[in-house]
Amino acid sequence: MNAATPSDTALDEAPLYEARRKIYPIAVRGTFRRIKWALLVVTLGIYYLLPFVRWDRGPGAPSQAVLVDFANRRFYFFFIEIWPQEIYYLTGLLILAALVLFLMNAVAGRVWCGYLCPQTVWTDLFQAIERMVEGDPRQRREKLKTASRTRRAFEAAAKHVLWLMLAWWTGGAWVLYFADAPTLVMQLLKGEAPAVAYVWIGALTATTYVLAGHMREQVCTYMCPWPRIQAALTDEYALNVTYRYDRGEPRGSLKKTQALKLQGLPGGDCVDCRQCVSACPTGVDIRDGLQLSCVQCGLCIDACDTVMKKIGRPAGLIAYDTEMNVQRRQRGEAPIYRMLRPRTVLYAALIVLIGGLMAAVLATRGWEGLAVIHDRNPLFVQLSDGSIRNGYTLRLVNKQLIPRRFAIAVEGVPEARLEVVGEAATTSGGPVVSVGPDQTHEIRVLVSTAARLPANASLDIVFHLTDVTGGETVSVADHFKGP
Amino acid sequence: MADMHRQNIDAVTGVSTTGHEWDGIRELNNPLPRWWLWTFYACIAWAVLYWVLFPAWPLVTGYTYGLLGWKSREAIQADLAQLRAQRAVFADKLAAASLPEIEQNPELLAFARAQGRAAFGDNCAPCHGAGAAGTKGYPNLNDDDWLWGGTLDQIHATIQHGARSADPDAHAGDMPAFGRDGMLPRPDIVAAADYVRHIAGLAPAPGADLAKGGEVFDANCAACHGAEGKGNSELGAPNLADPIWLYGSDRATIIQTISNGRAGLMPAWKGRLDDGTLKALTVYVHTLGGGL
């Protein structure tokens, strides 16, 4: 371009730094506010109370439904017990979570940001406390003029104390997931809890207080990567909180619009009351269109619908819609809503597939495990009678809560002799090894053969681990090396 | 003042300028943040305090000890004492148990093998190799061929006192240098080497005089290695009839062995390692090849 357009110049001259405006949103009533309250109660209720839910696993096992047991290296989730080597379930869960996020985004934009993100939920609660103690924005402004300094200071102090208590409870609930909750609560009350508990409670109290109380929308606008990623994942059919400017513009007061209409000129439904801006927790004017700092919580819809109802105009001037439909309506075409699109179908199919795979793997996994490590140095040993011996380290896993006995056998090596170090061979069949309940046991196994092996032999050997009483079997393949 | 500052505000960044200007370029006034400065000052104060309290400055013959009297040597000794106290539960059991008892108790076996593996890596691996596979002159400890015996007690004795070491209880027994010391003429040595290869089941060299070799063997070698060459672990005389060779089984190597003798040295470890470690090492080495 030869000459800078006005907007280019504006960008060049605009300050690179924007000072923060404090945002005090007004309280609104309506459908989306009710949905948000419900989700807030459900999600925070789960977070704060879940550690106290009990789940009987029998003697010797923790009775907490959800527990991350670092000391014993176990993760318990109701009837599921995860060992460290099964951490790939977490990978599956994260993939599933990402796909659900993508699907929500393809259907209705930033549903996660607006309703479910912890940053949004806690900020929402902190703002509710702020309104409860210090009043709504209008009362705040009046108090600045009328109320005494002491009263304002007292209210501010009360707000921060309430915030800190809530933040402290948030950190306190977090540590309960890592130890028996009732025991830890008693320890905390007596001041006998381990230092790591206090450190984590302190750290999470600080982050909750700072992020939800002080930083709020700054986190969403400047710190969070999801708005940027989300913008790259969305398409023109995804529903977003949209100001229908085809209906709203030209905006103006009730009288002005009526005057315009009398002259036969077009008049919009937007009365420019700015309730949508006042209700916005991130300080956005939704009438400027879709923008990065809008978390799409739907509170402007509630605010606008309330006004429309009062002035007797139809609701839905701001609603879940698409920019494409606004433009189509402007051209007099019918809006298009398309839920079944390649991306929504694909995401849903992938969610079903991965969820199904994980459920199937979880349901069919065994209660015993075997890992085989071949000696690397030396790979093989020649014995004085000329036979060849290979050494292996076997790790036996017993995930049941009772002690079990396993028979060990090998296959694939001719004339194989099997010896377990420290275990006397039983007469019938191969050696038998005991493994304690919920434990792993490492043994050294020596396999030797007097058979003549070809040069540079590498035979496929299979180790079979069989429960002596139950008969469950695990087999692991490895190699048997010769000279 | 306030007005002057206002004049010097840069429009784009909203930051005040220092008033300096070069070719129309003005310098923004961005001083170091206060928190940074105060952290810096606090670090300086901390450093001075540290010099006073802790060992800090090197002097000509020593160093400044600091008021707290902290010493890194004492700190590591305290750590080691704590480690020993932690291990004491098992270490005491290990000290009390006999060697066969250790092998029969899975818990003690696992502890002894873990401790033994670490001690082996520190002390034995330089000669015997990390996996104890040995090399020429240093026996492979994974097989079932033992110069000085492969039972738990025999291995324990060998590790404690060594072989041909300065320890009075060390294993003794040399392979004489038959050639160098003029005890056998060269043709007898060659014949004996052929005969040794014969009893080991290796193909004889063309023109080998096995009859003469047998005579030489019976007269000179059988005293230690036995009439059938099966060896004698009392003397550290290796079994010559098996396929395991410490120095090599080719004709030239055997001739060299008979001519110049062999006297591999295993150091004594008693006194250098504590008794618990020696026991753990014994169990570890014994379980490498399943023991005898």
Image: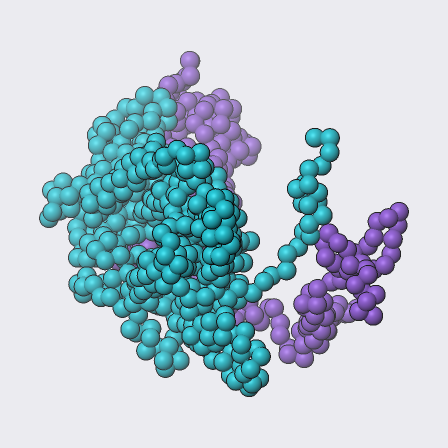
Q: How many marks?
A: 0
- Residue B126 percent location from the top left of the image: 51, 45
Q: Is residue B179 above or below residue A444?
A: above
Residue A380 occupies which quadrant of the picture? top left
Above/below status of B195 relative to A108: above
Q: Residue at x 53, y 64 (%)?
A: A23
Q: Nearer the viewer, residue B3 or B227?
A: B3
Lateral position of residue B227 relative to residue A109, left or right:
left
Q: Which of A139/A94 is in front?
A: A139
Viewer-nearest residue: A272 or B81: A272
Q: Is residue A108 visible?
A: yes
On the rendered image, what quadrant is the C terminus of chain B found in?
top left
Image quarter for residue B51? Answer: bottom right
Residue placed at 27% from the left, 57% from the top?
A76
Q: Residue at x 79, y 63 (%)?
A: B6
Quarter of the rendering occupied by the N terminus of chain B: bottom right
**Residue B75: x percent and y percent?**
56, 70
Whether A314 is drawn above or below B84: the answer is above
Q: Which chain is purple?
A: B
Note the chain letter of the cyan one.
Answer: A
Q: Nearer the viewer, residue A20 or A27?
A: A27
Which residue corresponds to the image point at 32% horizontal and 37% vertical from the top-left? Answer: A339
Q: Position of residue A67 (x, y in %)?
A: 30, 61
